[in-house]
Image (spheres, helix red, strand yellow):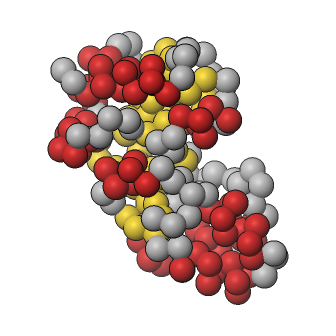
Amino acid sequence: MANISDIRKLCGPFIEDIRSCGATTGLLRGENESIGISKHIIRRDRRPLNTPEKFHKIADDYFYEKFNVRYRSAALFCTSRYYIANVYGKTVSLVFPIGNYTVCWSDSSKDLYCDIYIKCKGDPEKFSMLIDNAHYFQGNVCEAIKSGNEVMLHCDSYAYFSVPVAGETEANRRFQEIIDY
C-alpha cells in the first residue's frame, strides 16, 4: 500500500459509512511502527496485555455468544479519542478497515479492562454481570465513534495511516483529507 488513493480504493465500505453520518474523526490507534501508510492483517490469537487469561476468555465467550465474533481475541482495539490513542504508542494512526468489517462497542464502558475488570475485583460472576450490563452493541461505526469509547474492530485486514501529527486537530484534518475525495 503506497498512498491515500489506495486507502480510498480498498476501504470503500468504511469510508461510505463515515461519509453517511458526517463523522469528523475516525478510528484511531496508538502504534510503535514507522510513519507512513501500511496494510496489516488482524490477528486471530490476540492475548491480553493486562486482563488475566481467565477473564479474557469469559469476555471472548460472551461476545461470541452474543455476536458470533470473538471480539477480545480476533479484533483490533481502537478509539476515536486522540489523547487515548496517543497513550498506546509513539504515534497515532488513522485506522481504515479493508472490505467488510464490523465493530463492537459499549455506550457505557469506555474500556473493558478499566470499567469492568477492575470493578469486578477478581470475581468471575461479577465480571460477567458487568459485561452484560455494559450494553455492548455490534455495528453502527458512526455511533461507536461518537461514543468515544473502546471500539473493537473485526475485519480481515486494515490500512493505517501513521503520521507525526501535532495533536487531535491535525489527526482530524488528515482523516477528512482521506475521506473527502
Residue at position x 46%, y 60% from top? 105
Res 177 → quadrant? top left
Res 53 → quadrant? bottom right
- Whole-percent x, y for residue 181 in the image: 18, 20
Closer to the camera in the image, 137 or 12: 137
Residue 29 is left or right of residue 120, and the answer is: left
Q: Is residue 15 above or below residue 164?
A: below
Residue at position x 45%, y 20% from top? 170
| Residue 164 can be seen, yes or no | yes
Number of numbered labels in the structure image: 0
The extreme right residue here reads 122
| Residue 13 can be seen, yes or no | no
- Whole-percent x, y for residue 9 in the image: 23, 26
- Whole-percent x, y for residue 118 in the image: 76, 67
Residue 63 is left or right of residue 11, and the answer is: right
- Whole-percent x, y for residue 11 in the image: 29, 34
Closer to the camera in the image, 122 or 42: 122
Residue at position x 75%, y 61% from top? 51
Closer to the camera in the image, 127 or 56: 127
The extreme front residue here reads 169
Q: Is residue 53 above or below residue 180?
A: below
The quadrant of the picture occupied by the N terminus is top left
Q: Is residue 64 above or below residue 170?
A: below
Residue 24 is left or right of residue 61, and the answer is: left
Residue at position x 74%, y 72% from top? 119
Q: Is residue 98 above or below residue 125?
A: above
Res 137 → quadrant? bottom left
The extreme bottom residue here reads 125
Residue 1 is left or right of residue 118, and the answer is: left
